[in-house]
Image (spheres, rainbow, N blue to C red):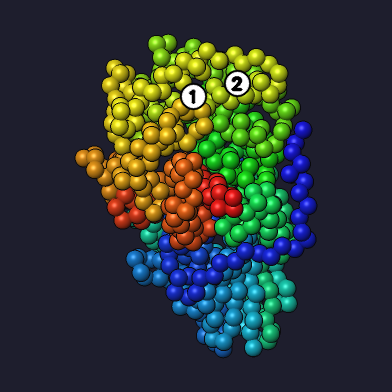
């Protein structure tokens, strides 16, 4: 039985939630906007439309949600007024040097349920451009409304590429243009379809005269990655508007075997706008918090839920623009992305995707984008100890709010199989220590916890042995089996293992603080990290009020920042306060002091257990404000430890999901 919440009655036309940037802030290249198509494909740029990464433009998934290729970097837009030509686009050629003057005429950008609307004023003409990426279409549509006191001409085309989204062209791509009135096919290894739709305007198609155009990517430069490429630009149509103006739409679509037609981009925009308003309202009704932050994060959450083709089912993109779908991230994110937003059917499908791909008690850490001899995404890496345990937590949370007993009966044997493998022993040294019932994990050269960076042969944060959050998750998984069994009228099968592990958790306490890891030789690792918060926030983890108080005080003194928790105390000599630069430097800092937002929710849960609601809200204020500072409407993956500058993916699933969960928890506590 699926829960009744899926059928909530929605009002016919809820108001869009809007956020406006004036001309100055709209020019900021660090403000990025994301549109997604539910298949892993996306359209990305600065809010003003400037490409800032190799991932900017239109990216289309060939084997959802992986094998993603870039087709377009930016539209070409030139307005002619009174004999003067004005470029409405802007491409950065070198730091601060632009081709096109689109930033100069910018009036502002408004996000309506995170759909961007850019307004420019040039020569007395107002041009409004809206964008949408229709569901499952592998496309981006640019909808222009021109308000003009006299006849004007708008030239439209694009800057095209044909490449894997992670790479750049060292020279202009060799593309062929096949024109047919209102449609142009741009052919390389793949095919891009460009269509023009006009209302109240005269159209003239050009014979394309492609030209190479260099583009600089400032965010790639900051990451030490290749920072420029050569695109192939082409003007494709000239649209003449009479006095008064009119409308025109440019639709760019990556062609795949499943590419649907998009006959009416204005209809597609209206449908998507309505869908987003309904998502926001559904989330507000589900969680009982009716503010703008819930509405914004509910729409943002939708970007990460994707349809997987092989294995078929719902999955979660861990972060945009470069991550694919990851099991650990999906399970941690499930509560915020689906349960608090009223999307219980997707929660069930998501759990099913990973339950059916379980192997020897483990779920995929990630699905493979390319596997020799197979299509993209057919295959997976099972190198995680916590993914399967987070699945048990997510499963119990889903069943608690859905009352989906049919799925409970289906999932219980799979949960027991998962726990059995952990008890007997499975891959990568993951096994229960028979001496104390705690879970051992790790082997040389393998990273299994969420602190999983490895640079060559260098395991940056080994944590082999018994990590503290893994024990909290192990106890939570054992508890989930017990409660689920009792709910279905069956005797629990792991009661003895549960009691033994509970009785041994006290080994992490040294009398003053909790250790981060008990090493293979039994020594305590005193590193101050956020993992104790993750463990103690889980209800099955045994601890006393005194122990919780000590953990909170230590986190406040050494880990807490306005945007999340340090991954290592700044007092530790291994601490790295700067996150950025080439990958080896980023990876070295990733879990050695860099601030992560998502563990902040666990810390807030501990505050709420003590009734410190006001302190919890104050601790959440910075992250709530960050929603409009980088990936607009979303939350960044990480922040540098010292300067707290956003880094990593500007759009991160578990950051969004856990901010939503934290905000709802605190808001509900404030209502009591």
In terms of image quadrants, where is residue 144? Answer: bottom right
The secondary structure type at the circle numbered 1 is: helix
Is the residue 350 above or below the residue 467 in the image? below
| Rendered residue at 58%/40% (across/down) | 335
Residue 575 numbered tag? none
Q: Is any atom of residue 312 visible in this view?
A: no
> Is 471 positioned to the left or the right of 284 in the image?
left
Q: Is any atom of residue 355 visible in this view?
A: yes
Residue 482 numbered tag? 2
Residue 474 numbered tag? 1
Residue 340's spot in the image, x, y percent? 62, 45
Of labels 2 and 1, the one closer to you: 2
In front of the other: 381 or 453? 453
In front of the other: 259 or 377? 377
In terms of image quadrants, where is residue 39? Answer: top right
Residue 578's spot in the image, x, y percent? 28, 50
- In the rendered image, the quadrant that contains the N terminus is top right
In front of the other: 434 or 161? 434
Is the residue 168 above or below the residue 250 in the image? above
The secondary structure type at the circle numbered 2 is: helix
Q: Earlier in the sequence, mark 2 or mark 1?
A: 1
């Amino acid at each position: 039985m699926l829960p009744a919440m899926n059928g909530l009655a929605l009002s016919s036309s809820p108001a869009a939630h809007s956020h406006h940037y004036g001309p100055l802030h709209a020019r900021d290249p660090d403000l990025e906007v994301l549109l997604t198509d539910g298949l892993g494909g996306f359209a990305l740029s600065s809010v003003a439309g400037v490409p800032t990464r190799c991932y900017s433009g239109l990216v289309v998934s060939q084997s959802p949600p992986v094998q993603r290729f870039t087709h377009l970097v930016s539209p070409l837009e030139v307005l002619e007024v009174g004999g003067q030509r004005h470029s409405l686009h802007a491409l950065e050629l070198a730091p601060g040097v632009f081709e096109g003057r689109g930033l100069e005429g910018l009036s502002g950008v408004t996000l309506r349920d995170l759909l961007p609307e850019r307004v420019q004023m040039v020569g007395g003409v107002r041009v409004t451009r809206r964008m949408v990426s229709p569901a499952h279409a592998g496309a981006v549509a640019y909808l222009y409304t021109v308000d003009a006191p006299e006849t004007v001409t708008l030239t439209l085309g694009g800057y095209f590429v044909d490449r894997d989204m992670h790479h750049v062209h060292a020279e202009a791509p060799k593309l062929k243009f096949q024109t047919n009135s209102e449609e142009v096919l741009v052919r390389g290894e793949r095919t891009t379809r460009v269509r023009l739709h006009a209302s109240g305007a005269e159209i003239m198609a050009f014979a394309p005269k492609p030209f190479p155009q260099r583009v600089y990517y400032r965010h790639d430069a900051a990451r030490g990655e290749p920072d420029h490429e050569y695109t192939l630009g082409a003007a494709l149509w000239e649209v003449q508007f009479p006095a008064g103006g009119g409308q025109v739409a440019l639709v760019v679509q990556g062609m795949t075997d499943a590419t649907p037609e998009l006959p009416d981009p204005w209809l597609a925009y209206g449908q998507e706008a309505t869908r987003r308003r309904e998502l926001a309202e559904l989330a507000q009704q589900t969680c009982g918090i009716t503010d703008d932050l819930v509405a914004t994060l509910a729409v943002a959450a939708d970007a990460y839920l994707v349809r997987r083709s092989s294995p078929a089912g719902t999955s979660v993109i861990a972060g945009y623009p470069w991550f694919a779908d990851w099991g650990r991230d999906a399970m941690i994110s499930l509560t915020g992305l689906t349960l608090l937003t009223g999307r219980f059917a997707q929660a069930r499908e998501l759990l099913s995707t990973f339950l059916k791909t379980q192997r020897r008690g483990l779920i995929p850490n990630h699905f493979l984008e390319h596997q020799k001899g197979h299509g993209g995404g057919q295959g997976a890496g099972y190198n995680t100890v916590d993914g399967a345990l987070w699945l048990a937590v997510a499963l119990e949370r889903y069943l608690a709010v859905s009352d989906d007993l049919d799925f409970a009966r289906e999932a219980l044997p799979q949960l027991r199989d998962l726990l059995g493998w952990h008890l007997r022993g499975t891959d990568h040294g993951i096994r229960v220590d028979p001496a104390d019932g705690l879970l051992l994990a790790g082997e040389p050269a393998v990273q299994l916890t969420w602190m999983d960076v490895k640079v060559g042969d260098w395991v940056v944060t080994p944590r082999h042995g018994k990590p503290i959050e893994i024990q909290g998750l192990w106890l939570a998984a054992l508890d989930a089996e017990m409660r689920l069994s009792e709910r279905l009228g069956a005797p629990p099968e792991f009661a003895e293992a549960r009691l033994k592990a509970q009785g041994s958790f006290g080994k992490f306490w040294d009398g003053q603080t909790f250790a981060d890891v008990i090493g293979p030789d039994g020594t305590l690792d005193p590193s101050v990290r956020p993992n104790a918060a993750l463990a103690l926030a889980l209800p099955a983890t045994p601890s006393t009020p005194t122990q919780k108080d000590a953990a909170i005080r230590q986190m406040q003194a050494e880990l807490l920042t306005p945007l999340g928790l340090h991954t290592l105390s700044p007092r530790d000599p291994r601490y790295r306060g700067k996150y950025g630069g080439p990958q080896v430097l980023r990876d070295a800092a990733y879990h050695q002091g860099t601030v992560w937002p998502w563990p902040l929710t666990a810390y807030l849960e501990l505050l709420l257990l003590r009734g410190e609601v006001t302190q919890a809200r104050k601790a959440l204020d910075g992250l709530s404000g960050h929603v409009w500072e980088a990936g607009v409407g979303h939350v960044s993956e990480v922040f540098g430890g010292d300067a707290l500058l956003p880094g990593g993916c500007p759009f991160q699933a578990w950051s969004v999901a856990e901010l939503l969960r934290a905000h709802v928890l605190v808001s509900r506590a404030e209502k009591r």
